[in-house]
Image (cartoon, grey):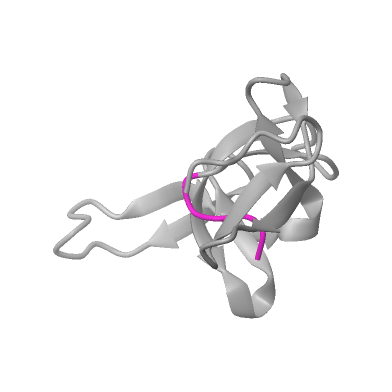
Amino acid sequence: MYIHKGDTVVVITGKYKGSRGRVLRVHPKSNRITVEGVNLIKRHTRPSQRNQQGGIVEREAPIHMSNVLPWCESAGRPSRVGVKHLEDGSRVRYYKVNGETLND
């Protein structure tokens, strides 16, 4: 997967098109990611030890990773991501728009 937890992404299609957020969780088996402030759903929760009151809780649901692009802060626009293999055998992700490496 070319998107990791903590990356900033922008939604390119759907109801939340244009919104930016930080990746909270990555679900590799289903190719889905959870983005902060995107795809909000309402859950009706019962009172528990953690949530004493219960009620309606709004939280993020996963979206498919094909609907987002990583956001390049230096370029100020979304970019695709590539992988470079260095001489020491390590891999580095980079933005294809300007060649800048992502901080892993």
Q: Residue at x 63, y 23 (%)?
A: 73
In this rendering, the answer to whether 78 lies above or below 51 is: above
Q: How many marks?
A: 0
Q: Nearer the viewer, residue 54 or 24?
A: 24
Q: Residue at x 74, y 52 (%)?
A: 82
Q: Residue furthest bottom?
A: 29
Is residue 95 one of those drawn in magenta? no
Main SS of the magenta part reads loop
Is 32 left or right of 50, judged from the image as shown?
A: right
Q: Nearer the viewer, residue 20 or 80?
A: 80
Q: What is the quadrant of the N terminus in the image?
A: bottom right
Q: Residue furthest left?
A: 49
Where is residue 3 drawn, in percent x and y?
Answer: 62, 55
Is 53 left or right of 83, judged from the image as shown?
A: left
Q: Nearer the viewer, residue 42 or 30?
A: 30
Where is residue 52 drawn, in percent x and y?
Answer: 17, 54
Q: Residue at x 56, y 70 (%)?
A: 27
Range covered by the magenta-colored residues: 1-6
In this rendering, the answer to whether 46 lies above or below 101 is: below
Where is residue 51 drawn, in percent x and y?
Answer: 22, 55
Where is residue 63 drawn, in percent x and y?
Answer: 68, 58
- Say which quarter of the image contains residue 18: top right
